[in-house]
Image: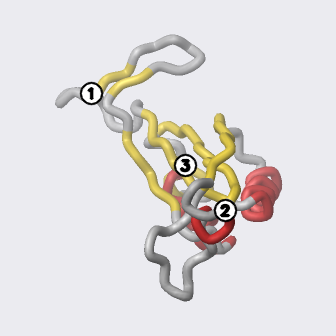
């Protein structure tokens, strides 16, 4: 299938409605019907303020970035964007075209590229 890789970058301690934003995003993706989502905590990084944050034993919690990603159809992406606009959440994101599918799918899985284009693409 054709879709997009939708990535959001949030501070690990950023909250919305009393919940951590990365948890809230995963919950919203699940409610929308997105097939799956993941959250990954950064080891180190910097953002627009050019301050380097690293995971160290004595570092205060909440300063590192969590990447939340979904692989979505255009319809799922629009539903997620609509939710974020409605909730007025300010987030940095990346949206990249992606091809996705399941190798050896069962009947509940969406069609894969192999089903659509054959083994040679």
Q: CA distance from mark 3 to mark 2?
A: 43 Å
Q: In the image, residue 12 lies at what x, y percent?
A: 44, 42
The quadrant in which the C terminus is found is bottom right
What residue appears at the point 77 percent right and 53 percent down from the top-left corner?
81
Q: In the image, residue 91 lies at what x, y percent?
A: 66, 39
Circles 3 and 2, Cβ within 8 Å, touching? The answer is no
| Residue 77 in view, yes or no | yes
Q: Which residue is mark 3?
A: 15
Q: Is residue 27 above or below residue 49?
A: below
Q: Which is in the foreground here, disc 1 or disc 2?
A: 2
Q: Which residue is mark 2?
A: 117
Which of the numbered marks, if any, corresponds to residue 59? 1
What residue appears at the point 58 percent right and 65 percent down from the top-left corner?
114
- Identify the mark nearer the N-term, 3 or 2: 3
Q: CA distance from mark 1 to mark 3?
A: 19 Å
- Identify the mark nearer the N-term, 1 or 2: 1
Q: How is the image coloured?
A: secondary structure
What residue appears at the point 51 percent right and 60 percent down from the top-left corner?
37
Return the residue found at the far left. 57
Which residue is nearer to you in this view: 108 or 64?
108
Q: CA distance from mark 1 to mark 2?
A: 50 Å
Circles 1 and 2, Cβ within 8 Å, touching? The answer is no
Circles 1 and 3, Cβ within 8 Å, touching? The answer is no
Which residue is nearer to you in this view: 115 or 106?
115
Which of the numbered marks, if any, corresponds to residue 51? none
Which residue is nearer to you in this view: 53 or 59?
53
Q: Residues within 10 Å of mark 3 (few under 14, many from 20)?
A: some
The quadrant in which the N terminus is found is bottom right
Q: Which is in the foreground here, disc 3 or disc 2?
A: 2
As drawn, is 39 to the left or to the right of 16? left
As drawn, is 45 to the left or to the right of 75? left
């Amino acid at each position: 299938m054709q879709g997009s890789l939708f990535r959001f970058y949030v501070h690990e301690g950023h909250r919305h409605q009393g919940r951590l934003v990365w948890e809230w995003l995963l919950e919203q993706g699940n409610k929308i019907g997105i097939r799956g989502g993941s959250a990954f905590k950064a080891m180190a990084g910097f953002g627009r303020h050019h301050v380097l944050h690293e995971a160290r034993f004595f570092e205060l919690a909440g300063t590192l970035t969590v990447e939340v990603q979904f692989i979505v159809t255009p319809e799922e992406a629009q539903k997620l964007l609509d939710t974020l606009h409605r909730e007025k959440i300010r987030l940095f994101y990346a949206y990249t075209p992606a091809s996705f599918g399941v190798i050896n799918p069962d009947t509940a899985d969406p069609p894969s590229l192999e089903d659509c284009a054959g083994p040679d693409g």
